[in-house]
């Protein structure tokens, strides 16, 4: 005998879909210089839901637009690096401005905003400098 189906709609409990716990995923932080020529993004250790640094983070990456587009990066360890062939040029749209004379801190990184440029360093002393006139990483 075939099973009898009711014409009544079935009641199903609507359970909220549980999101997987964000294991170690953090929130990025972004800022730009008052000139609008330099912008930075900080990725905490473990990365974010949209980006995971190769070494697991933390990572600080700053882009300079003029006179030539470059990106300076400080990772978890090692020297700062400067990339001159940046494929994903997307600077500088952050909402937060790091005014001249202000200091930004995130994870092991500290950045100093000055009229002469932006200097960022990691707790172990490795750093980079970005300005219109100079680009330096060590």
Image (tube, rainbow, N blue to C red):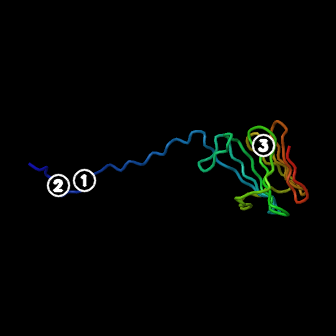
- Which label sits on residue 6? 2
Q: Which of 64 and 10 is in front in this view?
A: 64
Q: Residue at x 78, y 52 (%)?
A: 83
| Residue 72, above or below 46 | below
Look at the numbered discs 1 and 2 and tell me whether their residues touch, using CB distance below 8 Å.
Answer: yes
In the rendered structure, which disc, 1 or 3, sits on the residue that comes first in sequence?
1
Q: Where is residue 102 in the image (x, y as percent from the top left)?
A: 83, 51
Q: Distance between the residues labelled 1 and 3?
A: 56 Å
Q: In this view, does 30 lie to the left or right of 34?
A: left
Q: Distance between the residues labelled 2 and 3?
A: 64 Å
- Which label sits on residue 24? none
Q: Which residue is drawn at 60% across and 39% down?
A: 24
Residue 91 in which image quadrant = bottom right
Q: Position of residue 67 (x, y in %)?
A: 85, 63
Residue 99 in which image quadrant = bottom right
Q: Nearer the viewer, residue 104 or 81?
A: 81
Q: In what element is the residue under mark 1?
A: loop
The residue tagged 1 is: 10
Look at the numbered discs 1 and 3 and tell me whether their residues touch, using CB distance below 8 Å.
Answer: no
- Which label sits on residue 109? 3
Q: Is residue 22 left or right of residue 111?
A: left
Q: In what element is the residue under mark 2?
A: loop
């Amino acid at each position: 005998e075939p099973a009898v189906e009711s014409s009544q709609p079935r009641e199903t409990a609507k359970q909220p879909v549980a999101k997987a716990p964000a294991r170690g995923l953090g929130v990025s932080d972004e800022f730009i210089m008052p000139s609008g020529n330099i912008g930075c993004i900080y990725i905490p250790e473990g990365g974010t839901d949209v980006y995971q640094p190769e070494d697991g983070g933390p990572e600080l990456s700053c882009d300079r637009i003029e006179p030539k587009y470059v990106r300076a990066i400080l990772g978890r360890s090692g020297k700062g690096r400067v990339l001159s062939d940046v494929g994903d040029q997307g600077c500088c749209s952050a909402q937060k401005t790091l005014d001249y004379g202000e200091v930004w801190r995130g994870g092991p990184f500290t950045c100093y905003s000055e009229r002469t440029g932006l200097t960022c360093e990691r707790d172990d002393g490795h750093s980079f400098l970005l300005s219109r006139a100079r680009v330096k990483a060590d």
